[in-house]
Structures are given as C-alpha cells and as structure tokens.
Image: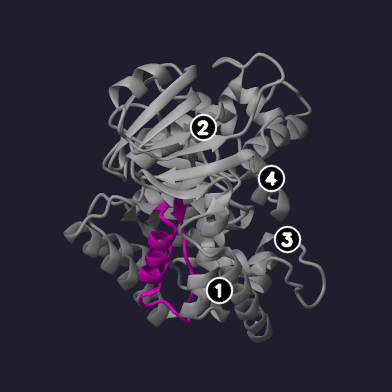
Amino acid sequence: MLITNATLVTWNPAGNEVLENHALYLEGDRIKALGRSADLERQYPAEARLDARGQLAMPGNICAHTHFYGAFSRGMGIPGAPLKDFPDILERLWWKLDKALTSEDVRYSALVCLADAVKHGTTTLFDHHASPNAIEGSLDVIAEAAGQAGVRACLCYEVTDRDGEARARAGIAENVRLIAALAQQPQPKLTAMFGLHASLTLSDQTLADCRAAHSGDGGFHVHVAEHEADEYDSLQKSGRRVVDRLKEFGMLGPRSITAHCVHVDAREMEWLRDSGTWVTHQPRSNMNNAVGAAEVEAMLRLGVRVGLGNDGFSNAMWDEWKATYFVHKLVHRDPRRANGNLVMTMAVANNAALAREFFPAPLGVLAPGAFADLILVDYHAPTPLNAGNLPWHILFGFENSMITTTLCGGQVLMKDRQLTTLDEAEITAKSRELAQQVWQRL
C-alpha cells in the first residue's frame, strides 16, 4: 500500500520531523520507504493507494498500562456510602467486579476497550487482567479479541492472594501457560508478561512461587505504591518498602513494569533506575482515586524510565497527555511543571522504547523497517506547526474525533472513521446485556 499526500510526523528518536507532501510505502506489516509523494508515486505506480488528503500521518499511540476487564464499571452505581478512599474503592468496586466476570464477560469487556482503542488510534496496549472466577483460559479469550480487532497487545494475569491459595496458583499457571505458548510459537502482534496485583495482596511465599515459576526475562507487571496503604503493608510484612521488597524477590528489571509509583521514596526511585525497570503514569486514574500525583519529573530527572498508561480509562491517549500536562501544574501551583516535551517523552519515546522490549521490530516511529502501525489525523493547524511546537498542538488543538484512519501491522482497522475489523453495534448491544447481568451478580 502507498499512503500519499500526507504530512508525516515521524517521532524519530534521533530528531522528530514534520514532513509535508510526503508518502509512506508499506510492504507486509512494515514500513518499506518514506519520501515525497511525487517520488514514491513514480517509484510504485501500480500499488494500491490510500490518499491521506493532507492529513497528518503519525505512529499509532501506545498505552503502557490498562485494564480491559474494567469496561463494565462504566455507569455502575455502587450501593452504600460514597467510596471514601482507595482501599475502599478496591474492596467495594474492583474486587467485587472482577469476581462477577465470566469468560464471556471477559471477551466483551476486551472488545469494548479494543473498539475504543482503534477509534482513538491506540494500536499497542499492555493489559493487566483479573477474573478470579474465570481464570483458566482467560488470557486466550483476550488474545482472541485482540486478534479480531487487529491491535498489538501484551497480556498478563494478576496473581493475588486475596482470593485464596487455589486461585493464586491458577493465576500463576495462566501466566506461565501463555508465556510458554508464545515462546513456542511467537506472534508479531501478541506477547505476554507475568502479572502480579500488588505487594499488599501478595505474601512472601506467593512472590517466591511467582519468581520460581517465571525464571525467564519476560518481566513482571505489577501495581506499586498507588496508595500509601501499599507501602504501609509492605513495611509491616517485611520491614521493607514495596520496591525494596520486589527487588529482594528479583522482580525488577528492564522488562518489568511498575504501575503508578505515586508514593515511592527517593531510594525506591534509585532502585527502579538502577534496575532499568519501567514506571507507568496514569494521571486520570490517580485523580479519580484521589491517591496523589506521582513525582514523574523527579523520576525522569533521576533517570527512571517513565511511560504513560490509562489504567482502564478510555484508550484516548491524548486525554492522558492533557491530564499529565495540567495536573502537575495544579498540584505544584507552578505553570512551568510537566511541560509538553516532558509529556511527549513519556507518551512517545518511552512508551515506544518499552514496546520495543516485547515486539520484534521498532514501534512508535515512521521509519523504514518499523511496524506499519499508524493513524491519520484530520488536523489542519491554524498556526505554524513544526517538530518543536507539535506537543503543544496535541495538548491544545488535537481532539480524538480527528482520528480518521487506524492501521496496525499494515492492516486497516478503521478507515474514514468506520471500523473494519469489529462490529461496534453488535459489541455494544451484547456488552450492555452482559453488563446488566454482571451488575446484578455484583
């Protein structure tokens, strides 16, 4: 396929470029060439064409931490007094919702989020799953949904002790099974990590069992210090803070993700940096749960690798950009905090570097040899647009409705705002029916 008449936003790590009147030539699931439209049209005269009509062509967005299983929480009323803090939210919402899910609920929760991702130009997602009464095969169900949608996904099941020893063992087995299957038969759009809920719901014995079961370099995906309760629990259990505890069990490293890290201290940040562990920032979720704002500027200055996720909020990643940009200014009462380049570093460069740890070709960049994961954005700047000011155009000008076309691995998932791989009407109707049943069970 030849995509013509585009303004390319390359997100090249060596120096982002904004290239007008350019084209992309795709071969299989990769980008083969980019150049001026007229030149590539002469070079590839017989290829199928997609006319960008002057739109921006950009790499697809990447979400470094999400929860497909939470889709059915939208609009749900929770009985009793208002939720007062994060432990209350866990116990009365999430730890009841996940128990109410069947395998069919898992499938449609994922499909709802995947349709949302395609519409919002998010082509790679790191999911963290829980369904204590439907553990076995749950990652296969999500993998099938991701395959149907056509996106790229990294999956895991969250191991926890909160539902008893048998379910903890089942969670370990579910992670091990998918990791082993993908090692035997790798897939370009699917990979896996080993999921852990959080230190506060994991005993030393279960952590040891997880480490023993996962001796490879696939990495761990775990919530860390989202609320102070996680740190207090770790200190009570072990005399160590959360990151120190995970370090003792060998769970940090360049292929591990620690989500949130809102309440880590300076020494924990050093452990994260020295081990090359990834941190993901989810500002919309942190605001909603009133847990605080992670010190992402300090972490980045220290050399910690910080990316951007959404924690199960909509897969409109530009909304996460905007939340990051604004919340740190508000918290610190300083408009200089969290500037656009810092947000871009997390959302673009760092998320792409994280994804490259797990997928066999570069992601998050328009360059020869990179995966052909890209979006067309119908944004026509009313002021000059260049590589230097692009982050501020995204923060103050881009809207999710401007995404018209989404491709992943060269496959068109949405064209002119019409989904091509998913039937959104069917998914919505079925998910509404299933969600009503989940609410009743909950």
User: For mark 1, what is the residue?
Assistant: 98
Asked whether the beta carbons under mark 3 and mark 1 sit within 8 Å of each other, the answer is no
Determine contact: label 2, label 1, CB under 8 Å: no
The magenta stretch is 125-152
How many labels, in total? 4
Q: Could you tell me which residue is drawn at 36 percent across and 63 percent down?
A: 207
Classify 373 as above or below 79. above
Q: Earlier in the sequence, mark 1 or mark 4?
A: 1
Q: Is residue 424 above or below residue 1?
A: below
Q: Secondary structure at mark 3?
A: loop
Q: Which residue is mark 3?
A: 85
* Residue 194 visible to an observer of this rendering: yes
Check residue 292 in the rendering and tell me which mark sits there, or answer none.
Answer: 4
Q: Hey, what amino acid is under mark 4?
A: Gly
Residue 25 against residue 418 in the figure, above or below = above
Q: Is tag 2's residue or tag 1's residue first in the polypeptide sequence?
A: 2
**Sequence order check: which comes first, mark 4 or mark 3?**
3
Q: Amino acid at mark 1?
A: Asp
Dot 2: within a 10 Å radius of its alpha carbon, few (fewer than 14), some, or many (20 or more) residues?
A: many
Q: Nearer the viewer, residue 335 or 16?
A: 16
- Cα separation, mark 2 vs mark 1, equals 42 Å
Judged by depth in the image, the label closer to the viewer, 2 or 1, is: 2
> x, y percentage for residue 242?
48, 51
Looking at marks 2 and 4 on the same chain, the residue that comes earlier in the sequence is marked by 2
Residue 236 position in % (x across, y down): 53, 60
What's the amino acid at mark 2? Ala
Label 3 or label 2, whichever comes before in sequence order: 2
Res. 305 in view: no
